[in-house]
Image (cartoon, rainbow, N blue to C red):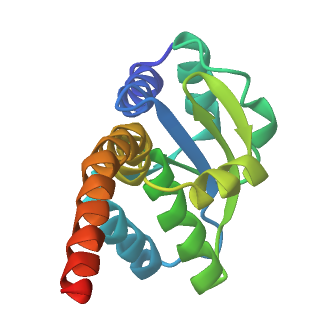
Amino acid sequence: MRVEKKYLIEEVASHLKKSEYVILANYDRMSVEDVSELRKRLVPHKAEFHVVKNSSLRVAGKALNLPDIEGALTGPTAVIVGGKNSTGVAKVIRDFIKEKQKGVLKAGVLSRRLLSASEVDRLADLPSLQALQAQLLGLLNQPATMFVRVLAAVPQGLANVLQAKVRAAEGKA
């Protein structure tokens, strides 16, 4: 294998190792300005947009035991990797493609599972990791809150009965 080709494959492999997810997109008809804008939108999520050769991606994917992405390797391909917020990154990409009417989601890999373009689109609809953690915390906290309310209801009920007796006694006097 030529040194240049080996270098390209190693570079693609290093990109793929950056996160538990990989999103593949067709960047056809995107201008340099569009790609630059998309990269800026990905920065808050610590994600990166890289244009890669399909042959290098194919070899690097097999070397890293990624699922078979062969069906997605047609036309110009970009990989989006990095960061821990796969839902936020998928949302940025989906919204950018809808807004600019350029580019197409091809596929994705999440935790070594192949995702179709529609599954990546559904991933974008999920709440962020922080929102899910807050919802879980709320669910875990809810039974304890209800238990405290039940315990507090008994003394409160007794106080209400005593208060009613006091009012009744004052009314008779």
Q: Is residue 146 left or right of residue 169?
A: right
Residue 47 image point, x, y percent: 34, 50
Picture mark count: 0
- Vertical comparison of 170 with 48: above or below: below
Residue 150 image point, x, y percent: 38, 44
Q: Residue at x 35, y 62 (%)?
A: 42
Q: Is residue 145 left or right of residue 126?
A: left
- For the residue pair 124 and 2, the one nearer the viewer reads as 124
Q: Residue furthest front?
A: 173
Q: Quadrant of residue 29?
A: bottom right
Q: Residue at x 62, y 55 (%)?
A: 25
- Vertical comparison of 5 with 21: above or below: above
Residue 50 image point, x, y percent: 43, 50
Q: Quadrant of residue 156?
A: bottom left
- For the residue pair 1 and 37, the one nearer the viewer reads as 37
Q: Residue at x 75, y 42 (%)?
A: 72
Q: Residue at x 25, y 49 (%)?
A: 155
For the C terminus, the quadrant is bottom left
- Vertical comparison of 44 with 60: above or below: below
Examine the rendering and report whether any part of residue 55 can be seen: yes
Residue 154 image point, x, y percent: 32, 46
Examine the rendering and report whether any part of residue 43 can be seen: no
- For the residue pair 2 and 10, the one nearer the viewer reads as 10
- For the residue pair 149 and 10, the one nearer the viewer reads as 149
- Vertical comparison of 142 with 168: above or below: above
